[in-house]
Image: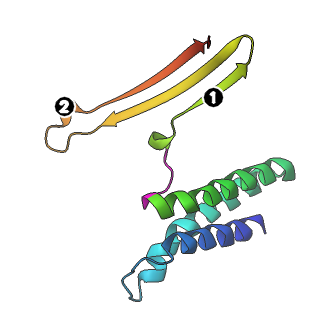
Amino acid sequence: MRAASLFGVLTVAHLLMLAGHSMPVSLWTPAAYVWQDLLMALLFAAVDHAMKRPKPAWALYAILALYSAVNVPIARILSSPLTWPMMTGTVYVEHPKVGRLSLDLQRTYYIEEIVTANNFSANLLAIRFTRGF
């Protein structure tokens, strides 16, 4: 039942992402837009059946549903869902008398279309301590 519910959540999120955009209309349009949601629900059903424990299955369901819910406004703005290369950010702890301790994750990718010898990716994890005067 969780897999069918996940399919519904993913399909509604997908429809919300596509709302207001022009789409080609044919017999294949529903299949083209729903096959990834169906595949994800089937994979979830297989994992859910293999787990045989409800709490981890509900946790996985919540993570997938939350990820799809977060993707709706991101895809509406950027016309692309949130992917791993887009995930960069800073986490910090600030104390007024001591200062700020920051943990930064920065990711970059460069893919050359013509000469593939120039492709590279870089990940930088920086720890910063700053103090205001």
Viewer-side residue, 110 vs 19: 19
Q: Quadrant of residue 21?
A: bottom left
* Residue drawn at the location 59% of the way across and 22% of the way down: 103
Task: Please report the bounds of the magenta region as a residue range.
Answer: 78-83
Q: Outermost residue toward the front?
A: 133
72 to 57, vertically: above or below:
below
* Residue drawn at the location 74% of the way across and 18% of the way down: 95
x and y, in percent, of residue 34 in the image: 52, 73
Viewer-side residue, 13 vs 131: 131
Circle 1 sits on which residue? 91
x and y, in percent, of residue 118 in the image: 20, 31
Indicate which disc, 2 or 1, sits on the residue closer to the N terminus. 1
Report the quarter where the C terminus lies. Answer: top right
Q: Nearer the viewer, mark 2 or mark 1?
A: 1
Instruction: Mark 2: give few (<14), some (14-19) or many (20+) Cα within 10 Å.
Output: few
Please state if 104 lies on the left or on the right of 1 as rendered: left
Circle 2 sits on which residue? 117
- Using the image, tell me which numbered label, if any, was put on residue 33: none
Majority SS type along the magenta span: loop
Report the quarter where the N terminus lies. Answer: bottom right
Cα distance in 3D space between marks 2 and 1: 34 Å
Is 30 a magenta residue?
no
* Residue drawn at the location 52% of the way across and 57% of the way down: 74
94 to 64, vertically: above or below:
above
x and y, in percent, of residue 116 in the image: 19, 37
Please state if 30 lies on the left or on the right of 2 as rendered: left
Is 81 a magenta residue?
yes
Give the amino acid type for the residue marked by disc 2 in the picture.
Answer: Ala
28 to 74, vertically: above or below:
below
* Residue drawn at the location 52% of the way across and 28% of the way down: 105
